[in-house]
Amino acid sequence: MTDTLERQQLGGFTAPEYRVRAVHDHRELESVLSEDRPLAAYALGHLERDLFDSANFYVADGPAGRGVVMHARGMGLATIALGEPEAVDAILSIHPGPRRSYLSTAAPEQMPNLRRIYRLTDELPMRRMSTTRQHFVPKSGETRRLSGRDIGRLNNLYASEGGPSFYRAHTIDRAVYFGVFDGPRLVAVAGSHIVAPNIGIAVVGNVFTDAAYRGCGLATTSTSAVTEALLARGCADTVLTVDPANTPAVHAYRRLGYEFGSHVVEARIRRKDWFGIGPSLRRRAAQRRGQFEDPPGTEIVTRSPQREQGS
């Protein structure tokens, strides 16, 4: 498909065209996102019925290949950028999303283009890790499944190093959380960000141990319990994100059968074009260029060889 895309002459340069579509079909999106399921875990999770209506998906095809962008609001504002950087850049040039969001997945090679569109803070270079039922190695230990009734203990644990914690009871009831207790005191916990059994994927997160209990293997125990429960629910790919410099965490996850995958970057993002005037004008031009395309609704983005900084 990309070999036959037309190109347009601008100022003596050959400007590649990218065909951008808003995609609403579950099957097409799952197919597009399944090339690297651990990398695309958050986007795949939003194909689950209770999250799908809260997400907008865009796919772009062009000479360099394919890109996918998701803007979602179901679990807080989140943006995901996957695929070829030029194709992602074409999407974001006309669909940059909300004024502020959290970049929960982007490959390192996406970052130069993302910095033209957003101001980024709190950048985190991370690695995906994942396991399956075949590779998972459970670790025994006494844990208990948490519910909304444990919300006070949970927030106290997460706030034990000085930061605020505002988890709500219904969030814990909908997710999968396991904790380790010392008497009545919750001292270690692991939970889930995404649980999507119909798509066969889950994301583990919020792993935390009280400072006085670290080095005892409790993070491994609680993460094992969450992983086992997610696999049992049909989440064939169970994924987490880790700072590769956090050697104890990496060792704990590897003991459970988690294996390294793609490099990812997370960050808080804020649009440079706060009022959206530039994207709106480009979107109208893209719609005019694509109005005779099949399928209907295609927007054609002509990517300038020298995009203006911050455009």
Image (tube, rainbow, N blue to C red):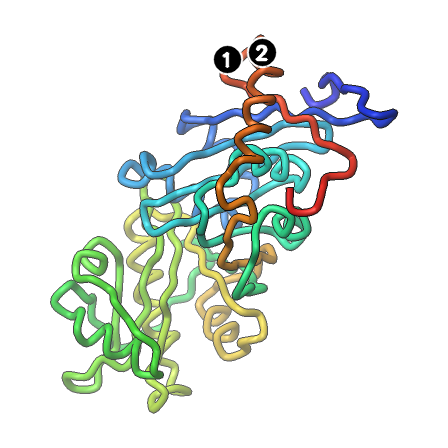
The residue depicted at 25 percent of the width and 77 percent of the height is 180
Q: Is residue 120 left or right of residue 166?
A: right
Left or right, residue 264 beside residue 197: right
The x, y position of residue 107, in whole percent, is 61, 51
Screen quadrant of the N terminus: top right
Task: Please provide percent x and percent y for residue 15.
Answer: 77, 27
Left-right relation of 229 to 134: left
Residue 106 position (above or below residue 59): below
Instruction: Name the residue type under label 2.
Output: Glu
Label 1 sits on residue: 296
Q: Which residue is mark 2?
A: 293
**10 Å crowding of disc 2: few (<14), some (14-19), many (20+):** some
Task: Answer whether labels 1 and 2 touch (C-beta < 8 Å).
Answer: yes
Q: Secondary structure at mark 2?
A: loop
Q: Which label number is shown at residue 192?
A: none
CA gap between label 1 and label 2 equals 6 Å
In the image: residue 274, left or right of residue 224? right
Give the residue displayed 58% in from the left and 8% down from the top.
Answer: 292
Residue for point 73% across, 28% down = 63
| Element under disc 1 | loop
Q: Residues within 10 Å of mark 1 (few under 14, many from 20)?
A: few
Q: Residue furthest bottom?
A: 212
Q: Residue furthest top?
A: 292
Q: Nearer the viewer, residue 296 or 302?
A: 302
Residue drawn at (40%, 29%) of the image? 26
Q: Answer with the quarter of the image where residue 133 lies.
A: bottom left
**Depth check, front residue: 162 or 5:** 162
Amino acid at pointer 1? Pro
